[in-house]
Amino acid sequence: MSDDPQLPGDARRSPALLRERFRAAFGSGQPRLYRAPGRINLIGEHTDYNDGFVLPAAIDLAARAAATARDDRTLRIVAADLGAAAERSLDERDPQPAHDWSDYVFGVALELERAGHRLRGANLLLTSEVPPGAGMSSSAAIEVAVALALSDLAEVELDPVDVARVCQAAENRFVGTRCGIMDQLASCCGRAGHALHVDCRTLAVHPVAVPGDVAILVCDSRVSHALADGAYNERRAACESAVRVLSRDRPEILALRDVTLDDLEASRDLLPEQVWRRCRHVVTENARVADAVSALVAGDLPRLGALLRASHESLRVDYEVSCAELDFLVDTASRCAGVLGSRMMGGGFGGSTINLVYPDAVGDVTGVLREAYRVRHGTRPGIHLCSPAEGAARLG
């Protein structure tokens, strides 16, 4: 369920419509079609780039690509939802970012070639129902859809983890966001009805069933975040600076994943207060991920909800990536009957909250969140009822 899609869901997902839009953009062709989902993250925020643990799920909102091969080395790209187009050559010398949406596409092409895969030029049409800036990984969905299309047209076989690595590298090196691999891996490896317990060091993925008696409600604050603007990268730099200090006498510490809360307490005088609090969030969040997996396996939904609430407080106080709008949504949801837990989701500085809700309370909770937010902030939040879905694939 989404309260404000650009087109009705069934129409946006129609292969016939996607092919029709491709022909309208490029004049002719029988394109191959690809789908790559966005993701929610139950818990495990800002742990992925610290070699930690996360618990995301692919969702039933996705980006789609329609593509045909060209005889030259030109990429012609149409972003149907934006009414925008771009064209670049795969043979560019010293390619530089355009600092717009096309960087997510061309960056993936560059990383595929850096990995040793010679690509063909392509006509590529992109569309997405994953809301941008809402913390559901609209950029990763586009990246993965593009990677599937370009590798398939070039007859390059990649496993899902390889696709995720390429897409993460594109965002790190070309777009400029030093993100971890969670978003891309969730899009590639999703499994219907399951969250994914991911070890971000080994990239081992273990599906964990999500009970059918809980609904996942995502509430978009409409406050758009731009993670490449600096704050996200600053958080990562703080974590890395702490590891350099903590590993001086303990070389086995390669990332904050290797640090316990006792280690951190013993090292308090070695780190600036703000950096220490950043580290405390990551260390305790890794522990919350393990507890959340246990809660899911045991069917202990109240425990899972309590972990979400604790995660939000840690993100708000220690990592300082929440904002007034997200805090208001979390506080409002937490007072609603039928809500098990609520927290901000994604990189922060805007975006969405994730709410675990008993299914028979979804309508009431949606109404309360929509009206309370309108009164306080003058706009309606986007409301999305998300279900764990299959990962990225070619459609035909």
Image (cartoon, rainbow, N blue to C red):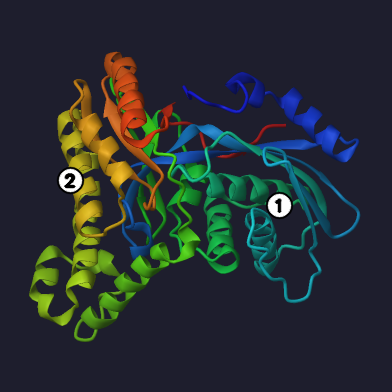
Q: Classify 268 as above or below 280.
A: below
163 left or right of 46 in image:
right
Q: Where, by quadrant of the figure, is residue 321 drawn?
A: bottom left
Task: Identify the residue under disc 2.
Answer: 310
37 left or right of 332 in image:
right
Q: Quadrant of the C terminus?
A: top right
Q: Amino acid at mark 1?
A: Ser
- In the rendered image, residue 175, in percent from the top left (x then y), is placed at 58, 63
What's the residue at 58%, 50% (across, down)? 159
Q: Classify 92 as above or below 198.
A: below
Dot 2 crowding, Cα within 10 Å, few <14, some 14–19, many 20+: some
The residue nearer to you, when weighing 128 against 351, is 351
Residue 76: image tag: none
- In the rendered image, residue 180, in percent from the top left (x then y), is placed at 43, 59
What's the residue at 24%, 68% (across, down)? 258
- In the rendered image, residue 56, in percent from the top left (x then y), is placed at 38, 43
Name the element at disc 2. Answer: helix
Dot 1 or dot 2: first in sequence order is: 1
8 left or right of 380 in image:
right
Tell me the distance, in whole angstroms, between the alpha carbons under discs 1 and 2. Answer: 41 Å
Task: Identify the residue under disc 1.
Answer: 151
43 left or right of 174 in image:
left
The count of marks equals 2
Name the element at disc 1. Answer: helix
Residue 13 visible in the current orientation? no
Q: Where, by quadrant of the figure, is residue 378 drawn?
A: top left
What's the residue at 46%, 42% (across, down)? 136
Residue 64 visible in the current orientation? yes
What's the residue at 42%, 56% (across, down)? 203
